[in-house]
């Protein structure tokens, strides 16, 4: 802001040391560097400087707000309740991401272990092509199967069970292999460094990898926090140690004693990560298998016969079941009542068995899920001569939306191909008269610049399939303003109608609440799925 003001001959005050560019820092004299170091600006100084900069922006810079108040418009939220199988799929993914500790950080762990890439491949597979856990959850709200070919949510549930079982087995096989490899690596490290050639400190460190390995298999495995997982890991460790000893060569790029020491120790650290992964996979699979048992009309193991389902609940964090009141009491203390389970339980993890429904309820969502069915239904209730924009952020989800709307009998256009081809799509969509066979629905990517600034006033309806997932409030406001501005601009002859679809009790509502100050009012006045209707 200060540099922009200089172009108008205005000075907004001196810069703070943290705001100098690298080029400016290089040009500083020793006295200037010392002055910046000596002068510590108070919060009041920063507040005053911010007020001056804001006053400059208010006076000389146009705000990114369209001054089109005279164009009538209406905004409403459409809250979608997922049918039981879709709800189970969403809860399973959310719980699985948390169990694998991917909710807050999904970046690859840098490691020198040879098996780390296999582990990361399994974790990446959980995201199903998404760049982050949040993106994966947003997609799951919109469609129950982004990477498979399931024709229904019930079929997707069966695929999830098969996939999670296979992933669990891969993790178990890796623990067995890595146990044998870590044992052999420690032996190779100790054989390579003779005690008589080491100083006192190195002699002490020489035993560190074996101490870590022995502590892990004798103490930490038993303290996994889940009896079922602990028993399985103990069997895998026993099988790994029973394998014939193999020859392990220490990496040639690890030159010094400490480098080789840390590489050897990392083999044990990988075992700990694999142990944590297997515990998470056992818990998430146990939970989802319990959900499928309930939806198929079966009884949950470990419960007294004849207990009414209305009095039972499941813990999504570990898959254990019990009377609802008892689970709620333990959840307040953040503990699972099942013996040997140390899962971190929160009140939000308690799910009533009666709310999971049964497979007979699956037809509510159809082949493309409840949200896309509701969107297609809304578009079908608009006038035949009115055109609709549908905004989606992710390319693979955009393709699913196209398939769903086309299957519903709607004529749909997408921006794809060369810039010329994209311009032709926009030009055809903007034709004043809608001819037979012309598309009256245009799918747009919220983050694609192809349609930025385009005049699409022939459309009077804008549907946001999900809230925008971005890193900052400024970016959210900017993208949202751009999207609405495609139709709410001069030249618009109809009332602009904006619909924001969200799945209740999901990441949809979390993002909308975080990004919109009026979210509580918008959700309180929201329609329910198919009840949302355009103005007559």
Image (tube, grey):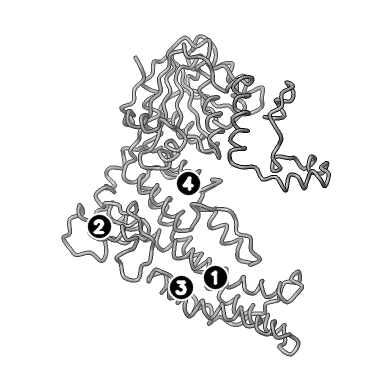
Q: Residue at x 63, y 67 (%)?
A: 113
Residue 310: give x, y in percent of width and height: 20, 52
Q: Are marks 4 and 1 in contact (CB under 8 Å)?
A: no
Q: What is the CA distance from the residue labelled 4 to the residue labelled 1?
A: 31 Å
Q: What is the crowding at mark 2: few (fewer than 14 residues within 10 Å), some, or many (at least 20)?
A: few
Q: What is the CA distance from the residue labelled 4 to the residue labelled 2?
A: 27 Å
Provide the secondary structure element on which disc 3 rests. Answer: helix
The residue that disc 1 covers is: 271
Q: What is the CA distance from the residue labelled 2 to the residue labelled 1?
A: 37 Å
Query: Where is the C terminus found, in terms of image quarters?
Result: top left
Whichever of labels 4 and 2 marks the residue nearer the N terminus, that label is 4
Q: What is the crowding at mark 3: few (fewer than 14 residues within 10 Å), some, or many (at least 20)?
A: many
Provide the secondary structure element on which disc 4 rests. Answer: loop
Quarter of the image where one finds residue 15: top right
In the drawing, what numbered circle is on residue 298?
2
Provide the secondary structure element on which disc 2 rests. Answer: loop
In the drawing, what numbered circle is on residue 233?
3
Q: What is the crowding at mark 4: few (fewer than 14 residues within 10 Å), some, or many (at least 20)?
A: few
Query: Where is the N terminus found, in terms of image quarters?
Result: top right
Q: Are marks 3 and 2 in contact (CB under 8 Å)?
A: no
In the drawing, what numbered circle is on residue 148?
4
| In the displayed structure image, the side of residue 26 where residue 281 appears, left or right | left
Quarter of the image where one finds residue 31: top right
Q: What is the CA distance from the residue labelled 3 to the residue labelled 1?
A: 10 Å
């Amino acid at each position: 802001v200060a540099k922009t003001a200089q172009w108008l001959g205005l000075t907004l005050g001196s810069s703070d040391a943290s705001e100098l560019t690298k080029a400016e820092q290089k040009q500083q004299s020793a006295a200037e560097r010392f002055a910046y170091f000596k002068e510590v600006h108070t919060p009041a100084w920063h507040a005053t400087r911010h007020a001056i900069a804001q006053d400059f922006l208010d006076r000389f810079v146009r705000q990114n707000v369209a001054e089109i108040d005279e164009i009538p418009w209406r905004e409403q939220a459409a809250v979608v309740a997922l049918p039981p199988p879709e709800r189970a799929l969403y809860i399973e993914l959310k719980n699985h991401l948390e169990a694998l500790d991917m909710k807050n950080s999904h970046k690859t762990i840098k490691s020198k272990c040879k098996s780390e890439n296999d582990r990361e491949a399994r974790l990446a597979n959980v995201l199903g092509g998404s760049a982050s856990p949040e993106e994966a959850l947003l997609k799951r709200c919109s469609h129950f199967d982004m990477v498979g070919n399931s024709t229904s949510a019930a079929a997707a549930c069966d695929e999830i069970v098969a996939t999670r079982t296979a992933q669990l087995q891969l993790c178990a096989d890796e623990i067995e292999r890595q146990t044998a490899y870590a044992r052999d690596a420690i032996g190779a490290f100790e054989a390579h460094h003779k005690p008589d050639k080491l100083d006192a400190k190195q002699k002490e460190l020489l035993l560190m990898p074996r101490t870590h390995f022995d502590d892990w298999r004798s103490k930490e495995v038993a303290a996994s926090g889940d009896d079922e997982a602990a028993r399985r890991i103990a069997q895998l460790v026993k099988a790994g140690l029973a394998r014939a000893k193999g020859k392990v060569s220490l990496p040639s790029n690890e030159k010094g004693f400490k480098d080789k020491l840390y590489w050897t120790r990392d083999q044990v650290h990988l075992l700990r990560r694999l142990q944590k992964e297997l515990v998470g996979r056992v818990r998430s699979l146990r939970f989802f298998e319990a959900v499928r048992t309930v939806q198929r009309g079966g009884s949950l193991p470990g419960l007294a016969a004849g207990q009414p389902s209305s009095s039972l609940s499941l813990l999504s964090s570990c898959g254990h079941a019990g009377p609802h009141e008892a689970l709620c009491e333990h959840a307040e203390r953040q503990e699972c009542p099942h013996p040997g389970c140390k899962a971190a339980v929160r009140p939000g993890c308690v799910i009533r068995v009666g709310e999971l429904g049964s497979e007979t309820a699956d037809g509510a969502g159809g082949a493309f899920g409840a949200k896309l069915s509701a969107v297609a239904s809304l578009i079908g209730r608009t006038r035949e001569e009115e055109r609709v924009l549908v905004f989606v952020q992710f390319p693979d989800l955009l393709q699913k939306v196209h398939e769903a709307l086309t299957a519903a009998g709607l004529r749909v256009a997408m921006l794809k191909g060369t810039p010329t081809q994209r311009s032709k799509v926009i030009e055809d969509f903007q034709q004043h008269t809608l001819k037979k066979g012309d598309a009256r629905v245009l799918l747009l990517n919220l983050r694609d610049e192809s349609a930025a600034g385009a005049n699409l006033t022939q459309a009077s309806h804008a549907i946001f399939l999900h809230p925008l997932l971005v890193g900052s409030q400024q970016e959210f406001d900017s993208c949202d303003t751009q999207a609405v501005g495609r139709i709410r601009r001069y030249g618009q002859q109809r009332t602009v109608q904006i619909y924001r679809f969200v799945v209740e009790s999901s990441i949809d509502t979390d993002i909308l609440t975080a990004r919109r100050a009026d979210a509580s009012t918008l959700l309180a006045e929201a329609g329910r799925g198919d009840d949302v209707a355009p103005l007559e």
